[in-house]
Image (spheres, rainbow, N blue to C red):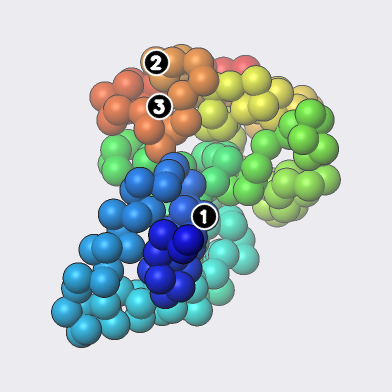
Amino acid sequence: MKVYIEPIGRLINEFSKLPGVGAKTAQRFAYKIINMKPEEAEAFANAIINAKSKVKYCSVCGNFSEDDICDICKNRSTESICVVKEPKDVIAIEKLNEFNGVYHVLHGTISPLYGVGPNDINIKELLSRIAKGGVKEVIMATNPDVEGEATAMYITNLIKPLGIKVTRLAHGIPIGTELEYADEVSLARAFVERKTL
């Protein structure tokens, strides 16, 4: 016996594909959509379609952008580059209003266990940016987990011979915590108290 009629089952199935969304939450989301007014449901669907069609990656830093080059890269000094794993980490740091430089999004970390090597993330692009000159500091802001630490050390070993200061966020953030889930006070302290590698 089918538990859900096909349209509801399909909607629940799609919601359950989202990270952190289990069967019960997917079911609640589906019921919420079904109970919306038609114009609300249409606005929700259009927001998804609009985001998917308009959001792209900045050609310089790899962050989310509506244009070829994001506003941060267009308007800030390139003397300091903050290296992060994902675009969501840029948002976490931007909320602090502590950093006035630019970012470089790796889109992953080195993880031999999962078959991710240095050539699978945006390390070459970072080195190309540095080679253009003017960079005085590279801040390693990858997550304080095994993969984040390994990636930070790998990149540090490539950059230090160039005579550029390399710093790492201080460990005010507990080991194993993802930046997007860190509280703002801990993240701000870690950012201010970063150390040279």
Nearest to the observer: residue 49 or residue 4? 4
x, y percent for residue 175:
50, 16
Q: To which quarter of the image does residue 94 belong?
A: top left
Q: Secondary structure at mark 2?
A: loop
Q: Secondary structure at mark 1?
A: loop
Q: Residue at x 54, y 46 (%)?
A: 86
x, y percent for residue 28:
28, 54
Question: Gap between marks 2 and 1, in whole Å?
Answer: 33 Å
Reading the image, the residue beneath label 2 is 172
Image quarter (top left, top right, bottom left or bottom right) of the C terminus: top right
Question: Gap between marks 2 and 3, in whole Å?
Answer: 9 Å
Nearest to the observer: residue 101 or residue 88? 88
**Where residue 186 is drawn, which disc sits there?**
none
Q: Residues within 10 Å of mark 2 (few under 14, many from 20)?
A: some
Q: Residue at x 28, y 30 (%)?
A: 184
Q: Earlier in the sequence, mark 2 or mark 3?
A: 2
Question: Gap between marks 3 and 1, in whole Å?
Answer: 33 Å
Q: Is 195 drawn above or below residue 162 in the view shown?
A: above
Q: Amino acid at mark 1?
A: Lys
x, y percent for residue 55:
48, 71
Reading the image, the residue beneath label 3 is 191
Reading the image, the residue beneath label 1 is 17
Q: Residues within 10 Å of mark 3 (few under 14, many from 20)?
A: many
Q: Amino acid at mark 2?
A: Gly
Q: Amino acid at mark 3?
A: Phe
Nearest to the observer: residue 124 or residue 108? 108
**Side of 156 where 4 appears, left or right:** left
Residue 12 seen in the current view: no
Q: Earlier in the sequence, mark 3 or mark 1?
A: 1
